[in-house]
Amino acid sequence: MTEIQKTAANADEKIKHLYETAFPEGEKIPWIERYGFTDLYTSSFHPFETKEEYWAYWAKHIWFSRYRTGATELYKMLLMHFPEAFVVTTNVDGQFELAGFPTERIFATQGDYRWFQPASGTPKTLIDNREWVMRVLPLIDDCRIPTVMIPTMPDGSPAAMNLRIDDSFVEDFRWHQQARRYTDFVQQASQGKLLLLEFGIGYNTPGIIRLPFEQMAQRFPHTTLVRFNRDNPEPYIEDLPRFTAFTEEIVSILNQT
């Protein structure tokens, strides 16, 4: 099981440079100067005054985070080292899928930039947004998209990002299917030797991966938890058996194996 929790709020200088590339100040659309953006994470909560501005921003955000490039070398390395892993992730950028992990062995608990959902939360359906993103990017002008390009669902109702920000988050049939597969995997794997690999999980959403992994390492007698975490390597459960933590860079550790 693998997870890389990486928010733009903690991005390094390379990511900051890429962010400024996506929202440059020097072009005729001065995103950073106009809105005071500093990173992708906090900018996603900006209170835009109009839907045209809001969706212009999200078109850029989705493209940058989901469609701009393929899988990074880190995710490719994870696939190479752990091809049989079942992935549970709070990331929404699709990197595990892009790296080649089978989609039936990926449980993305918090959504995916790839999908639109009904803003109301019902019905429990999702639509792929790639075509919309590619169509609307060239139409952005003065940090806005044309009103007619504001996305809607097939029934004409307002669309929203399929990201878990409130109770309207849509858990569609795929979400529940993967949740069952994850549960089944844990139940079966815990009967023998189970290795839990946890990458970079902090305390933003500890109840999804960090704490459950510790509980599994404590409960199942042949389960080992290996935590890769530069800032928060310590376990919450005291005297946790079969626990190892690394604070070094993930890539450097993988290169030694």
Image (cartoon, rainbow, N blue to C red):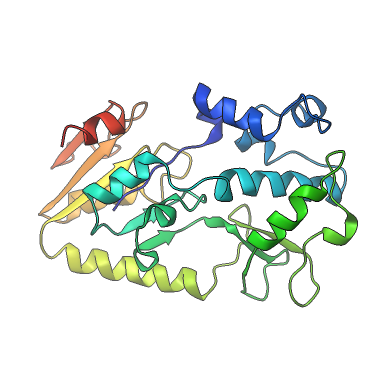
Residue at the extreme top: 13
Q: Is residue 62 above or below residue 155?
A: above
Can residue 168 be seen by looking at this rendering?
Answer: no
- In depth, the one of 187 and 173 nearer the eye is 173
Q: Quadrant of residue 198?
A: top left
Residue 237: x, y in percent? 26, 40
Residue at the extreme front: 138
- In depth, the one of 210 and 195 nearer the eye is 195
Residue 45: x, y in percent? 70, 41
Residue displayed at 36% across by 57% down: 100
Residue displayed at 34% across by 70% down: 181
Can residue 160 be seen by looking at this rendering?
Answer: yes
In the picture, which quadrant includes the C terminus?
Answer: top left
Residue displayed at 28% across by 53% down: 1
- 61 sits left or right of 1 in the view: right
Residue 164: x, y in percent? 58, 55
- 52 sits left or right of 2 in the view: right
Residue 234: x, y in percent? 28, 31
Q: Quadrant of residue 24?
A: top right
How many numbered marks, from 0 up? 0
